[in-house]
Amino acid sequence: MRRFAALSLAAVVVACATPADKITDALIDYGLPEKQARCMGERLEARLSLEQLQRLSELARANRGQGKVSVNRLADQLNREGDPKLVTAVVGAGVSCLF
């Protein structure tokens, strides 16, 4: 019974995740430092469409476990996707969140 309650609570918490939280998690999965990923997630929340958010998440999953990466590497991979607005938003957020 307790296990079911814990799983239910986890499902509620995941369902309540904001777009910024999802972006942050994707960037952390990608290998960016947590502080920078959180800053970028907050900035990108208003700038990304659902489709762009999904693309970023898919890229993060594909690169999971490859260690720490840079915003430049992320931008290079996103650039291959052919979405210059997504690249511009990610690089802009990455630069502004360096410090």
Image (tube, rainbow, N blue to C red):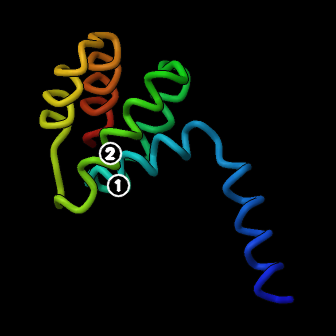
Residue depicted at 33% across the width and 11% down the height: 85
Pick whichever, 59 or 48, lies toward us: 59
Pick whichever, 10 or 72, lies toward us: 10
Residue 20, located in which quarter of the rendered image?
top right
Mark 2 Cα shell of 10 Å, populated few (<14), some (14-19), many (≥20): many
Q: Check disc 1 and report the residue beneath it.
A: 29
Mark 1 and mark 2 in contact (Cβ < 8 Å)? yes
Reply above or below: 25 against 59. Answer: below
Position of the C terminus, as image quadrant, is: top left
Residue depicted at 48% across the width and 18% down the height: 47
> Residue 16, image x and y in percent?
73, 49
> Residue 4, image x and y in percent?
80, 80
- Given the current orientation, which residue lies at the most extreme right position? 1
At label 2, the amino acid type is Ala
Provide the secondary structure element on which disc 1 rests: helix
> Residue 29, image x and y in percent?
35, 55
Position of the N terminus, as image quadrant, is: bottom right
- Given the current orientation, which residue lies at the most extreme bottom position? 2
Pick whichever, 43 or 1, lies toward us: 1
> Residue 52, image x and y in percent?
43, 23
The Cα–Cα distance between marks 2 and 1, rounded to whole angstroms, is 6 Å
At label 1, the amino acid type is Asp
- In this rendering, would 70 be left or right of 43? left
Residue depicted at 29% across the width and 22% down the height: 92
- Closer to the chain start, of discs 2 and 1, is 1
Reply above or below: 19 against 26. Answer: above
- In this rendering, would 28 be left or right of 51? left
Provide the secondary structure element on which disc 2 rests: helix
Mark 1 Cα shell of 10 Å, populated few (<14), some (14-19), many (≥20): many
Residue 60 is labelled as: 2
- In this rendering, would 21 be left or right of 28? right
Residue depicted at 46% across the width and 32% down the height: 54
